[in-house]
Amino acid sequence: MMLDDIIYVGLLIGLIGFGNYFRSIKNPFNKQWISTGVGFFVSLIVSGWDILHPIIMTIICAVIISQLSPRNRHTTSFFFSFFYLLIISRLTEWYGLPEISTHTNLILMLMTLKYGAMGFELNAALEELKTNPDIQCYKAMKNISFLDVVHYGWSYMGILTGPFYRYRTYYDCINRKFSDYIECWEPTLYKLKFIGVSTVIFLLANHIYPNYYVLTEEFQERPFWYRLWYIYPSFLIFRTRLYIGMMFSECVCQMAGLGVYPVSSEPRSGLGPKDYKLAEQIALNPEKIKEEKMDFETVYNIDLWGVEKSYLVRTAMKRWNITVQYWMANYVYKVFPWRNLRAAATFFVSTIWHGYAFGYFVGIFSVVLFLPIEDTYVKFYTQSKENSLTRKGWWYFLWLLRFNCMAYLSFGFQLLNFGSIYIYYKSVYFVGHILAVLLYIIGRTLKPYLITKTESQKL
């Protein structure tokens, strides 16, 4: 590990430990300022002078959200936050400024999600107040101030690694007492064990099968099947690294008491309670809180076993970086005006949010081209008889298809630049691309025969 990685992991571990103290703070005013102060401090450590970028973004977005009318603050904040991320911070060399650090870029990415969604959330709260005028959180959101926006953006909870959470989730962490009625250490310890195992696997695999090896002359001289097989250890390295980061972020939030809600309020990752009115009623009744079962579903960002067992790319992606998937679905997919282009628009926004590297387009946007192939074979699976050998066979085929697709495309995320990606795919003769085309042609050819046969059997 490099020194900055060690510092980064050390800060995350420190923030997990800090959560015990943070939960003990009872005064909301003190709690809010301490959260912001710690968030600024850790950002300064990893960013140095680059911290000016998130400061500038925050000041302008805070003015937009707190001062503009509800009619246009949501779209203005959304587009400005993306404009700053994509044009100002990522093209600094155009202005004669030094390139920002990776950690600063990540902080800006997370702030973009928060500020981009905040205006929409505030407007939704105003609508909700028309039918439920007594919800305290929504009344506070109606009178949002400049400092409220700043505190939300700079909260130490998730500032380095996520997850995304709504303003009302932050408000409840500061002002509610849900975290007093749940054991925070037990679920955190469970995740830390997974982090430990994942870290050992990552370090060993990365040492034995580093991804830069595919760019060497020695690798090019290896047999074809070895070169193709190399996607599997590389995909293992890719997955475990992301698992470590996402589980660390969940641990920080859990120990801080962020995202704790009664199970009866039906909390969802990113969203929080579906029945927020019920959550509010429970929060105002100390006796009722004691009777409720609580969970951290709101800040769960990775369903590790769900990802591994998914037989569809669509499903696996929804269980990976769940809160960001929630953000993309609600603030891009559902609001994009042209229905037929919603999926493509969502994948495109997700791609550029990650960065301009060619590898992000390979790793994310290429999925748009793969989905029609998957959809074709899913029909064979769903049309086959329940519990039949044929249905089980299609399930395993789809699982292998999903796994190999993600493994093959993950090289885009790992190598990033066009030249490096081209060298690897050329070394395996673009076999993944060729197989994808062949599978699509075969699927379309078989479709009328297999589906008709299955339907006639049901009759």
Image: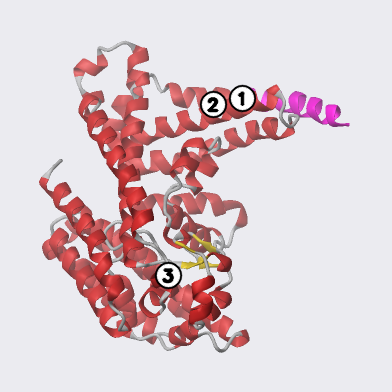
Alpha-carbon span between mark 3 and mark 2: 54 Å
The residue labelled by disc 1 is 441
Q: Main secondary structure of the magenta part?
A: helix
The residue labelled by disc 2 is 437
Q: Quadrant of residue 456?
A: top right
Decide which of tag 3 and tag 2 comes sooner along the chain.
Answer: 3
Residue 455 seen:
yes
Task: Report the front residue among 281 and 351.
Answer: 281
On the image, the x and y values in percent for residue 110 come to 33, 61
Q: Quadrant of residue 132?
A: bottom right
On residue 181, the disc is: 3
Q: Amino acid at mark 1?
A: Ile
Magenta span has 442?
yes
Rendered residue at 61%/56% (across/down): 339
Dot 3 alpha-carbon crowd within 10 angstroms: few under 14, some 14 to 19, many 20 or more: some
Q: Depth-wise, is mark 3 or mark 2 nearer the camera?
A: 3
Task: Report the front residue among 64 and 404.
Answer: 404
Rendered residue at 29%/85% (across/down): 29
- Could you tell me which quadrant the N terminus lies in? top left
Residue 90 seen:
no
The span picked out in magenta is: 440-459
